[in-house]
Every structure is written in C-alpha cells, then in structure tokens.
Image (cartoon, grey):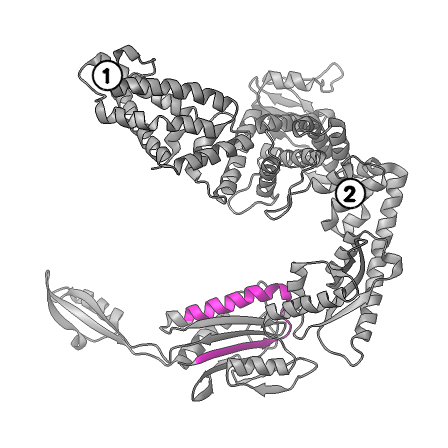
C-alpha cells in the first residue's frame, strides 16, 4: 500500500493563514481520494512559511472495479423511455438484459466501472484541490490563470512503497510535479530529492527546516524560557504570539535583547503591547519588580555573530516605537494632572457611540446614573460607583488608547491612579469591560461589578430600543457577548437582582439623555403642534411624558411633531435640514424582549453545564425569572430532583393528573379549580393523598419563600407514593358526578401544588 507525499512550495504564507490551510489541504485531498474509491490509514498536514505539506499513509493502490445493476423500463415501454435509459447508462440495446419482474418483463443494465490506479486519482484530486483552494486572499502572477496565496514555485508529489518512489504525473499551468524540494532560504537553498515522508522530514531538518509548527513553537518557548531563567527572569506567556511567530520562521533562533533604560518606567502593558503588535517580541519580566525589562525575538537563521547584528537592528527599531509610546504616555499624564480624568473625559462629547444613541459622553451619563442605582444591590457605595462610571471611558480619548485600542481600560486604571482616585475606582476603570469572553475573569470588587453591569445593560437596552438586535450569525455590536457578560457577572458574584427593573431604569436613562439635550418629547392631538407662545417647543418633565403615553418620539429642538393620542406618528412638520424622527419603542416591550434574549443566553450557558433545556424552560416560566441567580438555583435543584426515581415517577404522576384534568375541562367546558372536599373521599388512598398534599403545601410554601429549593423538591417528592397509590386504586371518571368533580378538583390541587415549584408541563418525557 503506497504512501502519498505532497508539498506545495511557494513564497511566504502569512502565519495567520497556515493553520486553516493545513486543515483545508488535509480535508479536501483525503475527501477527494475517498470519493474516488481509495482508502487510507492516516493523514497529517504541515505548514512552514514557504510550504504546505501532506502525508497520507496506507493508501490503497487503486480504486476497485464497481459493478452496478440498474433497473430500466418495461420491455414493452415506449421507445423514447428506452432511449433515455440507454443514454443514462452509456450502453447499447444489445448490452441490456430482459428479466422477469412483478410488473412483467423489465430491462436491466449491468454497468461496470473499471478501477483506476492511485497515481491517476491522486493527480486529478490534487489538481482540483490546488485550483479551488479556499485561501482568504489569493493572487495571480505571470501569464497563468492559477491563483495561490503567494506565487507557487514547485509541487512535490510522490507515491512510495517497498519498491521505491514514483512521481505522480501532474502539471498545473506549467508547474510539473517532481520529487525535489528546497531547505532553508538562506542556510540551505539548494534543491534535493526525497523518496518518502520520513526521508523528506529528515532532510528538511538537515537543511535547517523544522516541518512541524508545534515543534517549532515548543522549541521557541523552551529556549526563551531557559534564556530568561538563566538571568532570574520570566517570559510573559502569550500563546497567540507564540503560534504566530512559529509561523514566521522555519528554523527558529531565540535571541534576548535589552530595552532602553529610558523606557523601563512605562507601564508593563504598554511595553508588552507595543513589542507584541509592532515587533512580534516576547516580553521578559522581572518577577520581583513585576516590570518588563527585556525582550525576546526569534530570528529565522543562525549568524556568525550569534545574532548580535540582528539584536542591534531590532533594538534601534524598538527604541523608535517605544519613543512614540513614551510620548503618548507623558502627554496623557500631563492632561490628567492639569485637568483631571473628568477633564479628559470631556472629549467624549465629540466621540459618537451610535448615530441613534448619542455620543460616548451621553452614554457615560447613562451608565453613571445606572451604576449609582445598581451599587447598593451589589454592595458598593453609590457615590464611588458613580465616580468610577463617570471616568471609566475617559481613556478612549487618550493618545495611548488611540494608538493601542486594546489598552482601553488598562490605561484608564493608570490614569485614574495618577489623578488620585482610589477605593476601587481605578480598578473599575479597567474591569468594567470584563468579562470579554468565556475564558475571561469576572470582576468581584463591588464598584467594578456595578459599573460593569451598568455598561453592559445600557448597551443592550440602547440597541434594543433602536431595534438593532443580533440576527442569525450577525452580531456587529457584540450584544451576545454583553448578555453573557451580564449573566456571568450576576452568577459569578451570586447576586440577586431584578434585571427587569434595572432594564426599565436603563430605558428611562436613555430617554433622559434626550430630554436633557432639549429634545422634544411630546404627546399632542392629531394635527396640532405642541409649541409655546414664542413658537418654540415647550419642554415637559420626563415623568409627565412617561405617564401620558406608551410610545415616545423625539426630534431635534425646533422641529414640530404631529402625533395622535396613543403616540402613533401621523405627520412630521418642519423638521429642519438633516433632522430625523428617532423612535423609541414601548418600554414594556423592550424589557420583555431583552429579558427573553438574556434567558436564551442563559439556556446556552446552563446547557454547557449539563442542565437540560426543558428544565430551564420549566423554571423560567415561574415568577421572578428576571433574577438569574434564582433561576439557576431552581434549575439546579429541579435537575437534580428529576434524576432521582422519586422525581421521574412524580413527573409521570403529575403528567397523568394534568392530562386527565385537561381532557375533562375541555370535554365539560368548565374549570375544576375549586377546593376538593376531604369528606367526599371514598378510598383510603384518596384520604392519604389529601393528607400528603396538606403536608407538602405546608412545607413547599415556606421553602420557596426562603429559596430553599432542595427542601421544596424534597417535599414534592413526598407526593410520589400517595399519587401512585391513588391512581392505582381510584377511578377518576366515576358515574357518581359529585365524586367525579371532587376527584377532578383534587387533580387540580395536585397540579397547583407541583406548579408552585416549577412548570412541570414543560418537562419532556
């Protein structure tokens, strides 16, 4: 069984494209081989800056001969039907067989597809893959039509077995496949031939090329770690940078260099970001001082001077980059010391957050009001939360964040410290963006939590108001991430919050923003303009507006808005050049819809933790579903309960009671919700069920009140045996109508008691 070795040798492939290219090459070639009738044992793909390689082991020598029987039309069918069948099979009439069938004599065709050698199939598959390869960006060069990420120089394509290696006959736009490749561009540029994957990998290593990207990354990390450790330092871990650098070199040579003394007082994050983004350098930290003191660069070749020239050149470039960073840092500090961080934040008025949601300054005002309201609920002081929220976005107008946007929040912390803020305010400036993703940490400091929640809830509410919600895979404003951030902040800090009320406050804060700007919020009769004697719009208090109607429409000052008494826009009067109607949706609808979105994200979060979707639905249907911590506690308790025998059997008893009761109510056209009378109980099991319900109700109500859901489930479990015995011994739809009504009312009591804990009608099974 031959092995396939394929190498596509080109100019430098961008590091960010190499991993995906490996996966695509492996999948497309192996899928093509299998579709053509070949099988294989295993396959692996590799990438270096100048080559993509694929090794397929245990390939079958050729595809099998296939014999297929096809049933055609009846022998006496019209001639056109027969002609169509012959065209589909590629046979002639004399090659068909007439056989007896249950519908009479029928034509059968036996179609044989001869097998083909592996070399022929490989050539077809490889050419098809190369011509249709899904590079994110590709180019043409010369006079050919072939497209590749960078000019393709050569193709190595061989099949090897015990008898030796043979080149696959393949020619793509004049590039003929062979058995040769090249090593390192500078240290071993001469071509050489190979006979197998093992020979290929070994010769590449001898010519200064490490084929496996993971091996290159491991080598870089180990060498960098050892170099730092020898000087009592440590490498700042950066897995993303490590993977990128491993894709930039074929023969990694680790070098450690010095950072100029003048730049060591820059914040560590500034040094690390500048070196990573501009130079692809690793940061080397002094673990005692916590300061970045050196850098590690990875060269792509060995030099006679052991990298001294390379380090000197890198040092000069780095000094220029850090000189810019130092200028930004000192300039920002000067602004903060002269005007304070609130003075820097004044520049946010000129930064648009969204055309329909105002500036960043408007947003900061809303977040500040909301953070003040949330603060007591999370254990923070309202004044501190408002102070932090008021300056949390100030660094967005700093020169440093303008140059390095990824430092937003981090620089806010430094500037807040420089401005003299304390008591958790600087930390809140950094942490209010968190968590940024599933692996990011969740803030726990009360001030940070208050501002982080206010930031995310304001964003969600604002985009819900202007109807810019996520759709399908599109989420341009990262609202799903914001919703998950709210969920993780609430659950991670075990907070009991009524998110519905907070969303209402965020909605009102948005309206207040426009009212404070003098925007007209008016409810006037149809055909009349709401203006004062001077012809200008008459401002009214926000409270009056909220009490007067459900929908609010706003325009720039000086505009005339005609609306009817229920708030529906009828006609826009003189609105001035460039002005527009800005519609704010109904407050209750926004809250309901936004909570539903949060619940959907919560379902995803809890499903990842092993809680079934129907269990989550059962607790979300209960009152208080805007308290996410309460929902999770209920869901966890219900999930654990349903995994027990008592829970499973009680669920079946509940569903039986509910089904019988529902059918009887539909049939009789009445609702059996009156209290059943114990004195009408005829059977001992019926009397026992009354007693069990009395006990359960007495235990469930206080347990639910104190949020002791485990105790509520335990009390509900006590109903299992009495309900089972009741259904075994008693006929519900008895001829005695008084007894029947009483028993149906008893079923209603079973349903009502169980529904106090969770909506079990939503549980499947």
**Magenta span covers which residues?**
3-32
Q: Residue furthest top?
A: 679
Image location (x, y in percent) of residue 105: 10, 66
* On screen, residue 447 above or below 160: above
Q: Residue furthest bottom?
A: 163
Give the residue drawn at x 55%, y 71%. 46
In what element is the residue under mark 2? helix
Q: Could you tell me if residue 445 is visible in this image?
A: yes
Q: Quadrant of the C terminus?
A: top left
The disc at residue 65 is none
Q: Which residue is mark 1?
A: 740
Of 153 and 428, nearer the camera is: 428
Residue 435, quarter of the rendered image: top right
Q: Which residue is mark 2?
A: 412
Is 20 contained in the magenta span? yes
Cα distance between the residues tagged 1 and 2: 72 Å
Q: Quadrant of the N terminus?
A: bottom left
What secondary structure is the magenta-colored segment mainly?
helix
* On screen, residue 423 above or below 176: above
């Amino acid at each position: 069984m031959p092995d396939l070795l394929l190498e596509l040798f080109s100019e430098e492939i961008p590091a960010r494209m190499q991993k995906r290219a490996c996966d695509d090459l492996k999948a497309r070639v192996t899928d093509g081989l299998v579709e053509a009738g070949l099988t294989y044992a295993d396959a692996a793909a590799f990438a270096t800056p100048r080559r993509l390689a694929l090794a397929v082991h245990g390939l079958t020598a050729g595809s099998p001969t296939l014999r297929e029987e096809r049933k055609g039309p009846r022998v006496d069918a019209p001639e056109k039907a027969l002609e169509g069948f012959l065209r589909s099979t590629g046979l002639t009439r004399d090659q068909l067989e007439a056989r007896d069938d249950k519908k009479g004599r029928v034509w059968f065709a036996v179609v044989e597809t001869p097998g083909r050698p592996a070399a022929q199939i490989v050539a077809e598959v490889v050419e098809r893959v190369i011509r249709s390869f899904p590079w994110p960006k590709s180019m043409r060069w010369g006079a050919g039509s072939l497209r590749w990420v960078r000019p393709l120089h050569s193709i190595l394509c061989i099949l090897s077995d015990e008898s030796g290696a043979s080149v696959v006959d393949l020619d793509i736009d004049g590039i003929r496949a062979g058995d040769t490749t090249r090593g390192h561009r500078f240290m071993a540029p001469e071509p050489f031939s190979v006979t197998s994957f093992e020979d290929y990998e070994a010769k590449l290593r001898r010519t200064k090329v490490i084929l496996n990207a993971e091996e290159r990354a491991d080598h870089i990390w180990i060498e960098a770690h050892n170099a730092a450790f020898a000087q009592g330092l440590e490498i700042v871990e950066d897995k993303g940078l490590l993977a990128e650098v491993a894709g930039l070199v074929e023969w990694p040579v680790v070098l450690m260099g010095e950072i100029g003394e003048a730049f060591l007082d820059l914040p560590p994050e500034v040094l690390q970001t500048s070196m990573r983004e501009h130079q692809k350098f690793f940061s080397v930290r002094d673990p005692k001082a916590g300061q970045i003191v050196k850098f590690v660069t990875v060269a792509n070749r060995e030099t006679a001077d052991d990298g001294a020239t390379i380090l000197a050149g890198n040092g000069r470039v780095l000094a220029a980059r850090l000189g810019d960073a130092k200028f930004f840092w000192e300039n920002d500090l000067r602004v903060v010391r002269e005007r304070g961080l609130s003075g820097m934040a004044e520049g946010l008025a000129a930064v648009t957050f969204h055309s329909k949601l105002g500036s960043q300054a408007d947003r900061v005002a809303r977040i500040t009001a909301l953070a003040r309201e949330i603060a007591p609920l999370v254990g923070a002081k309202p004044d501190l939360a408002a102070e932090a929220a008021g300056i949390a976005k100030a660094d967005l107008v700093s020169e440093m964040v303008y140059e390095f946007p990824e430092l937003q929040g981090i620089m806010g912390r430094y500037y807040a410290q420089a401005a003299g803020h304390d008591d958790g305010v600087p930390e809140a400036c950094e942490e209010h963006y968190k968590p940024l993703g599933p692996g990011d940490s969740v803030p726990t400091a009360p001030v940070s939590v208050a501002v982080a929640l206010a930031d995310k809830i304001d964003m969600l509410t604002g985009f819900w108001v202007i109807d810019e919600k996520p759709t399908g895979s599109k989420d341009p404003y990262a609202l799903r991430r914001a919703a998950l951030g709210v969920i993780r902040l609430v659950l991670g800090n075990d907070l009991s919050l009524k998110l519905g009320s907070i969303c209402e406050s965020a909605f009102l804060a948005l309206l207040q923003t426009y009212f404070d700007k003098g925007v007209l919020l008016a409810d006037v009769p149809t055909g009349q303009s709401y203006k004062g004697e001077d012809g200008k719009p008459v401002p009214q208090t926000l409270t009056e507006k909220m009490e007067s109607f459900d929908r609010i429409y706003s325009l720039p000052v000086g505009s005339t808005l005609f609306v009817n008494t229920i708030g529906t826009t009828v006609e826009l009067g003189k609105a001035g050049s460039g002005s527009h109607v800005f519609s704010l949706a109904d407050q209750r609808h926004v809250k309901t819809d936004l909570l539903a979105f949060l619940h959907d994200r919560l379902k995803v979060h809890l499903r990842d933790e092993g809680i079934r979707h129907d269990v989550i639905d059962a607790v979300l249907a209960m009152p208080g579903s805007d308290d996410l911590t309460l929902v999770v506690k209920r869901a966890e308790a219900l999930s654990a309960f349903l995994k027990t025998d008592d829970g499973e059997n009680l669920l079946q008893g509940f569903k039986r009671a509910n089904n019988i009761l529902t059918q009887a109510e539909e049939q009789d056209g009445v609702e059996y919700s009156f209290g059943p009378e114990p004195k009408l109980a005829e059977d001992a099991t019926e009397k026992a069920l009354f007693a069990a319900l009395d006990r359960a109700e007495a235990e469930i109500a206080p347990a639910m009140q104190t949020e002791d859901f485990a105790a509520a489930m335990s009390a509900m479990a006590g109903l299992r045996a009495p309900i089972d015995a009741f259904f075994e011994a008693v006929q519900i739809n008895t001829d005695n109508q008084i007894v029947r009504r009483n028993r149906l009312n008893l079923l209603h009591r079973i349903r009502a008691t169980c529904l106090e804990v969770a909506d079990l009608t939503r549980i499947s099974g």
